[in-house]
Amino acid sequence: MNNEQFLPIVSVVIPVYNGEMDLPELIECLRSQTYPPHSVEYLLVDNKSRDRTSTILQAAASNPPSVPPLLRGGSKKGSNNQITIRNLSENKIQSSYAARNQGIRASKGEIIAFTDADCRPETQWLENLVKPFADLEIGITCGEILALPGNTVLEKHAARDNTLSQKHTLAHPFCPYGQTANLAVRRQILARVGLFRPYLTSGGDADLCWRILRETSYKMYFAENAIARHRHRSTLKQLHSQWYRYGESNKYLHELHGVDLMREFTTGEYLYRLARWLLKELPIAAAKIMICKLDLVDLFNTPIGLLNVRARAIGQRQATLPLAARDIEQL
């Protein structure tokens, strides 16, 4: 099939929790997409927000498209900024996966794409994410996740380490997967393997991809030029929470799929890495900073990394998979 003629109806599902600061920029990114606006709907699902999220979504959804929604044909390029935004809510379960399920069930597209409220998809993001589905063997596509420009040392550290790059998850030793910040799947596959586990609070993207790749013959494609930029955490509290959830995810996936993901540093490893930083890395980095050859973030790479590893270890030890989290909702 010719990719240039491949324009399936697409539904983009975005869970939102307390997103009033992110939504204006996100919606502008959606309006700028090169994918034909008459062939895509954007379903933004408010997940029990306590800020102005609901008001912003209602206003965005009340601006109707100037062309009939979800009709094939027409020009492929050049959005007129009139897009179909549907305002939904998931008020029963506090979970981004429950919110995504709500969006999937309400969707009309044959391709379901996902991103997050704190992401900024580039203009050709959706177009490049959908193209690979012209190959009928492709069941999942994932695009690259890059960092938004950040000012704090923590944001710069995450950007330097490519913390959220799909290249990490695609190289997973058990089974590759894509993160829901930049992911798309065929609707017909969800009808076969089920939706997200709605009571799962972390690791749902890996769980869904693993079920698809291990239970069907579909393949996953890395659409590296389908780029969504992500806002990294700027405070220690936010960073700790992020890596704690990574630890929870390891524990949950271990229990759901029987895979050992729970590698932890020993006390000796922590002490060795800290001593190496204090005695060797820190003096060298400080000297280079003095002559403007390094950024301040280079001074703190090791201790930030150790804090992240510690938060993940705590998450692994403290996580308990709720019984309800084993349930898989059906389309």
Image (cartoon, grey):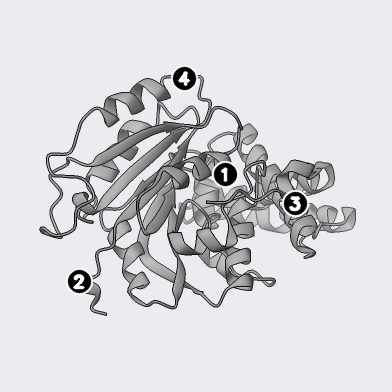
- What residue does disc 1 label? 97
Q: Mark 2 or 3 closer to N-term? A: 2
Q: Left of 100 or right of it: where is 69?
A: left
Residue 63 marker: none
Could you tell me the amino acid type at mark 2? Gln
**Residue 207 location, quadrant:** bottom right
Front one among 268 and 137: 137
- What residue does disc 3 label? 252
Residue at 77% over, 52% down: 251
Residue at 48% over, 53% down: 291
Mark 4 surroundings: few (<14), some (14-19) or many (≥20) residues within 10 A: few
Of tags 2 and 3, the one toward the viewer is 2
Compute the Cα span from label 4 to label 2: 42 Å
- What residue does disc 2 label? 5
* CB-based contact (under 8 Å), mark 4 and mark 3: no
**What x and y, as percent, mark residue 244?**
71, 43
Q: Is residue 149 visible?
A: no
- What residue does disc 4 label? 51
* CB-based contact (under 8 Å), mark 2 and mark 3: no
- Of helix, strand and loop, which one carries label 1? helix
**Residue 72 location, quadrant:** bottom left
Residue at 73% over, 57% down: 253
